[in-house]
Image: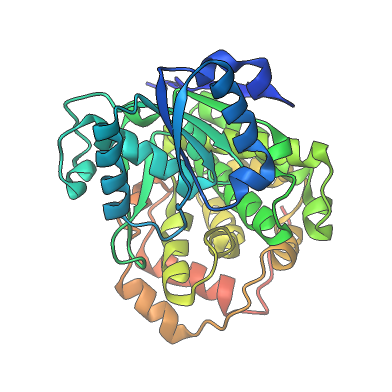
């Protein structure tokens, strides 16, 4: 039976932190977890600390999170938070930062070893987490999923629990205005992949479809801005809402094979996460059309494009600037991690299908697409 469970309170619009401060207050001491620069440069950190000071909330700031921050560092941070009596967490930043905040909340509330977090069974509810995203792509601010880097930075692993939904998320597009163009493009493509993978998914429902299609439409409305690399505040607002909407969609359906396959490209070719996924997206849509052409058409229509035009768009905003050989593809198939997630595909997905998607997307430069 389709269900929809999204307990995170969303507060959006300019100055939403100052206009709705009570959702930022959950005790007398909090930890602010951020990256090294974005929280300060964007203005988000200043807005948060202003509210905390006005309400006499003591806070510490941990500003060392990067894409490669490992599980042991997060675990040790959580232990120090526990010793210091931290009552809740505010995460300010991109996906890695928000995921670190969600993981630290679990560790700080439970006496577990680092790897036991993946058991997804916790004696105590995690500390309250409030998210303030400064990128528009990951959707971590509206999901129960947490991706962690293991102590080997080339290896990542995720866990999921309904207790890991953030309590609240503040969506203020002003905090994304300082994002570099390439980061904006890569995160927008990642958000698009989330929405498409949710819609072309056997777990999809009328509820998830609604937010998935709206995310696709919003990103499609920003296609010219993404190509030009010039963004108005209205564009930034659409991309930010789309990212959170894509997160809400995959929170209920799970991801699909695009992310699993893109992971291989990122790990072996050092291609940014969103760009790696985007390189495969058009071929995935084309493959899904064989099983359910009408839903594939829905995706393309929502974006306002066709397969060939969408491919050209991807080549411009998220180009694969590294060489991929058939030998690379053979190795990716040998190390494939798609088997479990392939059950979400609208049809039987085999390793041969996986090979064809890789080949057509990354090697076959003369690939032509049917007009639907």
The scheme the figure's colours follow is rainbow
Residue 311 appears in the rendering: yes
Report if residue 302 is visible in the image.
no
Image x and y of residue 164, in percent: 35, 31
The one of 332 and 131 positioned closer to us in this rendering: 131
Residue 38 vertical position relative to residue 369 in the rendered view, above or below? above
Q: Which residue corresponds to the image point at 56% horizontal and 34% vertical from the top-left? A: 132
Number of on-image labels: 0
Q: Position of residue 280 (x, y in %)?
A: 55, 63
Image quadrant of residue 354? bottom left
Choose top left, top right, bottom left or bottom right for residue 17.
top right
Q: What residue do we see at 54% from left, 15% from top?
A: 55
- Foreground residue among 271 and 201: 271
Position of 369 compared to 77: left or right? right
| In the displayed structure image, the side of residue 351 where residue 186 appears, left or right | right
From the image, which quarter does the N terminus lie in? top left
User: In screen coordinates, is 90 left or right of 156?
Assistant: right
Q: Residue at x 27, y 46 (%)?
A: 75
Measured as percent of width and height from the top left, residue 145 is found at: 38, 39
The relative height of residue 52 versus residue 304 in the rendered view (above or below) is above
Q: Quadrant of residue 264?
A: bottom left
Q: Position of residue 71 (x, y in %)?
A: 29, 53
Q: Is residue 189 left or right of residue 217?
A: left
What residue lies at 49% left-to-right and 73% top-to-bottom? 270
């Amino acid at each position: 039976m389709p269900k929809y469970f999204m307990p995170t309170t969303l507060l959006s619009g300019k100055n939403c932190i100052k206009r709705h401060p009570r959702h930022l207050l959950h005790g007398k001491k909090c930890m602010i977890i951020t990256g090294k620069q974005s929280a300060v440069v964007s203005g988000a950190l200043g807005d948060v600390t202003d509210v905390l000071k006005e309400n006499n909330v003591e806070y510490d700031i941990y500003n060392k999170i990067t894409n490669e921050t490992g599980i042991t560092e997060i675990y040790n941070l959580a232990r120090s938070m526990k010793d210091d009596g931290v009552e809740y967490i505010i995460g300010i930043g991109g996906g890695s930062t928000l995921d670190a905040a969600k993981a630290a909340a679990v560790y700080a509330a439970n006496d577990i070893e680092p790897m036991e977090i993946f058991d997804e069974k916790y004696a105590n509810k995690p500390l309250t987490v409030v998210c303030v995203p400064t990128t528009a792509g990951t959707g971590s601010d509206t999901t129960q999923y947490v991706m962690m880097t293991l102590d080997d930075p080339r290896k990542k692993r995720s866990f999921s629990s309904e207790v890991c939904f953030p309590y609240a998320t503040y969506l203020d597009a002003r905090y994304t205005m300082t994002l570099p163009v390439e980061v904006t493009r890569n995160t927008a493509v990642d958000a698009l992949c989330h929405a498409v993978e949710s819609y072309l998914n056997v777990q999809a429902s009328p509820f998830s479809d609604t937010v998935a299609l709206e995310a696709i439409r919003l990103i499609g409305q920003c296609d010219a801005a993404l190509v030009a690399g010039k963004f108005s505040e209205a564009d930034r607002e659409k991309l930010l809402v789309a990212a959170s909407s894509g997160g809400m969609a995959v929170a209920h359906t799970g991801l699909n094979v695009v992310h699993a396959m893109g992971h291989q490209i990122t790990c072996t070719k050092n291609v940014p996460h969103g760009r790696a996924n985007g390189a495969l997206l058009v071929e995935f849509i084309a493959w899904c059309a064989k099983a359910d052409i009408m839903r594939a058409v829905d995706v393309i229509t929502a974006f306002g494009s066709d397969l060939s035009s969408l491919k050209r768009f991807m080549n411009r905003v998220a180009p694969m600037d590294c060489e991929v050989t058939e030998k690379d593809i053979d190795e990716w198939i040998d190390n494939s991690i798609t088997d479990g997630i392939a059950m979400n595909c609208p049809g039987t997905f085999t390793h041969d299908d996986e090979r064809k998607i890789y080949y057509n997307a990354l090697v076959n430069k003369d690939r032509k697409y049917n007009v639907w």
